[in-house]
Amino acid sequence: GHFIKFGTNNVLLLKLLTQENVLVGGFFIISGYVSGYTSTLIGERRADERKLAKPELFFWQRVMGYYPLHVLVSTCFSPMFIMIDRWVNNPWSTTRLHAFLNYTLLQAW
């Protein structure tokens, strides 16, 4: 949404695409459909009991589907994150806390 003003002059489209909360809501709707699709039997309207018998396994499969990419991207961009923390004169303890929160996926809490 930040650079959409450079892509179009259509006022309606600008209002629609600059509402990040609408886009985030759409993402969660699609994620729910994907989660439902992957936990049901193909061609039937019931859950795949093997996939839902162990909820912790289902959870870890979901997390490990994106966590390695998160670690890779965070590591690649960590010099930028450190540089920004240093520019605003944060102490190293704050930088370490930010890294901990990011790598443990707690940064948004």
Image (tube, rainbow, N blue to C red):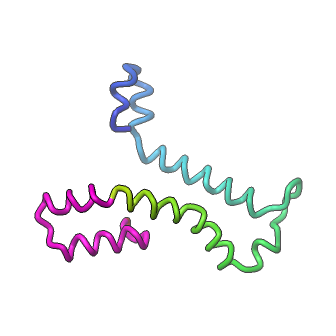
Q: Residue at x 60, y 51 (%)?
A: 29
* Magenta region includes residue 95: yes
Q: Is residue 109 visible?
A: no
Residue 44's place in the image compared with 97, above or below, is above
Q: Main secondary structure of the magenta part?
A: helix
Residue that extends furthest to the right in the rendered view of this protein: 43
Residues drawn in magenta: 78-107
Residue 99 in picture, x, y percent from top left: 32, 70
Residue 87 in picture, x, y percent from top left: 13, 58
* Magenta region includes residue 46: no
Q: Is residue 46 left or right of residue 93?
A: right
Q: Is residue 77 left or right of residue 51?
A: left
Residue that extends furthest to the left in the rendered view of this protein: 89
Residue 50's place in the image compared with 45, above or below, is below
Residue 35 in picture, x, y percent from top left: 68, 59
Q: Is residue 31 visible?
A: yes
